[in-house]
Every structure is written in structure tokens, then in C-alpha cells.
Image (cartoon, grey):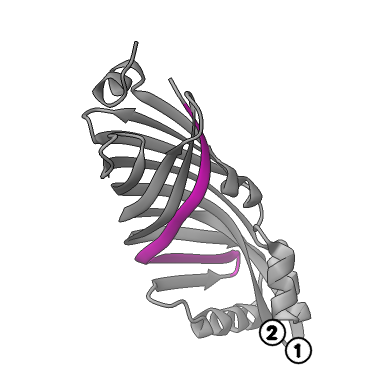
């Protein structure tokens, strides 16, 4: 019979988890964690968000309080697939899976998006939907705590996980445009202010392309229900 400490780890080295907070943001996040030493574990997290309207869309619309921005938000579509390898160190005397921990992680994410861009064409508001993909690779530090609720059930609180790295991507759109409309769209793209991101664009008679790259960052957090086996 297990006597806690090392015996508990020897018997049950694995934990699988579901992030409950992520469900409210329209994505499913699953994690597998395995003990490799008394206070050290390795983990892999898989997160998927089917392409669709952005989470909390109505909140952003209410904050904007602008019909033009509302149209853009309604037509904005985002999806993502993310993999996050992680190494954790637990500070508790009880060892792995118990108490506060620090985790070093890398986040490899692929985003698909449809971004509507409005522009003024000879006094008429036009919209072009630019679609494509963005890839972001970041590294970060997770501060968290894991609690034992019963023999097999745990709760993992991802308190704060800031991460930073780089990204690149391309957006494309097809639309037949005359010379005047092409100029109007170029003027709109030239006026875009995207912080810290370098982007180039090309507009011709059949559509537009935007290529961009630059810093990328984020924050991980969540509350996971976990099963140890």
C-alpha cells in the first residue's frame, strides 16, 4: 500500500486535465502531465479553437459602440491549434502534483483568421475580407498550484503564464478592383497601426496580400480538473 511521497509517485505518475476556463472562450484545452522525479514533471498541452466568431464578441461590440466597428467584429473569424511542452518543478515536500510550482514552457501556435478591412471607395464604404494563417512561437514561465481533492481527482490552477516570442503570417483576398479602388485600399492599408509588427502589402486588380512578422506574446491561465492514474 502506498505511504505517500515517493510511493505515491511510483504508483501514479500520470495526470490528465481539462481546462474549465477555456471552454468559456470557445476552445478545448487538454493536458497530460507525468512525474519524472520526486519534484519534477513534464507536460504536454493541446489546445484547439474551431474557426468562428471571436470569444466575448458581444462585449467588444458594446465597448466599441460604433456601427462600422460592429460590422468588422461580426465578420472577424479566428481559429487556432496550439501545442505547449512544459517542464515543472514543485516546491512542496509532498513532491510532484502537489502545491505551488514553476513551469518553463514553449508555445507553438497556428492561427487561421478572416479579417475584414473597411475602406472608403469614392464616398462608399467597402469591405474586403482577408484570410490566411499566422504562426507564433513563444517561450514563457508558468506560476501555478495543484491541489489534491480526492485519491484520484486534482485541481490545477494556472495562475499566470506570461510568454513572448515571434510570429509571421500572410493574409490574402480576391476582389476585382479598378485603379481608383486599388488606390483607396492602399491608402487604408498604409494607415493601419499594428503595434510592434512589420507588415508589407500588395494591391492589384485581382485582390490584395499582406505579409507580416514581429514580436508575439500572451498570457496563459486557467483552472483544470484533473484525473491521476
Task: Name the residue carrying label 2.
Answer: 120
Q: Is residue 223 magenta?
A: yes
> In which image quadrant can residue 93 be found?
top left
> Is residue 180 within the magenta segment?
no
Left or right: where 76 falls relative to 85: right
Crowdedness near tag 2: few (<14), some (14–19) or many (≥20) residues, C-alpha within 10 Å:
some
Q: Position of residue 220 (x, y in %)?
A: 44, 54
Nearer the observer, 99 or 196: 99
Which quadrant would the C terminus be assigned to in this image?
top left
Residue drawn at x 71%, y 68% as measured from the top left: 59
**Is residue 138 in sight in this rendering?**
no
- Left or right: 129 as drawn, with respect to 223: right
The answer for how far apart the CA atoms under marks 1 and 2 are is: 6 Å
Q: In the structure shown, which secondary structural element does the residue marked by tag 2 occupy? A: strand
Main SS category, magenta section = strand
How many marks overall?
A: 2
In the picture, the quarter occupied by the N terminus is top left
Report the residue at 52% width, 60% height from top.
171
Name the residue at 78% across, 79% down: 67
x, y percent for residue 160: 41, 58
- Residue under label 1: 123
Q: Position of residue 104 (x, y in %)?
A: 27, 48
Secondary structure under tag 1 reads loop
Q: Is residue 113 visible?
A: yes
Q: Which region shows up in magenta? A: 205-227
Where is residue 191? Give x, y as percent.
52, 85
Q: Are discs 1 and 2 less than 8 Å apart at CB?
A: yes
Amino acid at each position: 500500500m502506498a505511504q505517500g511521497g515517493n510511493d505515491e509517485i511510483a504508483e501514479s505518475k500520470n495526470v490528465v486535465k481539462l481546462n474549465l476556463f477555456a471552454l468559456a472562450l470557445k476552445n478545448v484545452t487538454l493536458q497530460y502531465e507525468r512525474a519524472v522525479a520526486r519534484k519534477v514533471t513534464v507536460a504536454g498541452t493541446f489546445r484547439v479553437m474551431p474557426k468562428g466568431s471571436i470569444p466575448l464578441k458581444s462585449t467588444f461590440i458594446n465597448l466599441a459602440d460604433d456601427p462600422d466597428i460592429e460590422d468588422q467584429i461580426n465578420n472577424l473569424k479566428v481559429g487556432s491549434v496550439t501545442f505547449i511542452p512544459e517542464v515543472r518543478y514543485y516546491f512542496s515536500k509532498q513532491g510532484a502534483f502537489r502545491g505551488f510550482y514553476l513551469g518553463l514552457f514553449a508555445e507553438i501556435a497556428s492561427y487561421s483568421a478572416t479579417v475584414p478591412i473597411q475602406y472608403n471607395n469614392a464616398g462608399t464604404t467597402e469591405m474586403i475580407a482577408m484570410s490566411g494563417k499566422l504562426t507564433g512561437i513563444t517561450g514563457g514561465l508558468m506560476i501555478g498550484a495543484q491541489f489534491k481533492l480526492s485519491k484520484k481527482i486534482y485541481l490545477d490552477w494556472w495562475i499566470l503564464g506570461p510568454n513572448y516570442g515571434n510570429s509571421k503570417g500572410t493574409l490574402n483576398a480576391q476582389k476585382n478592383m479598378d485603379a481608383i479602388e486599388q488606390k483607396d485600399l492602399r491608402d487604408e492599408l498604409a494607415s493601419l497601426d499594428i503595434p510592434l509588427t512589420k507588415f508589407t502589402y500588395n494591391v492589384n486588380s485581382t485582390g490584395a496580400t499582406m505579409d507580416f512578422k514581429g514580436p508575439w506574446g500572451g498570457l496563459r491561465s486557467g483552472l483544470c480538473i484533473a484525473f491521476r492514474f
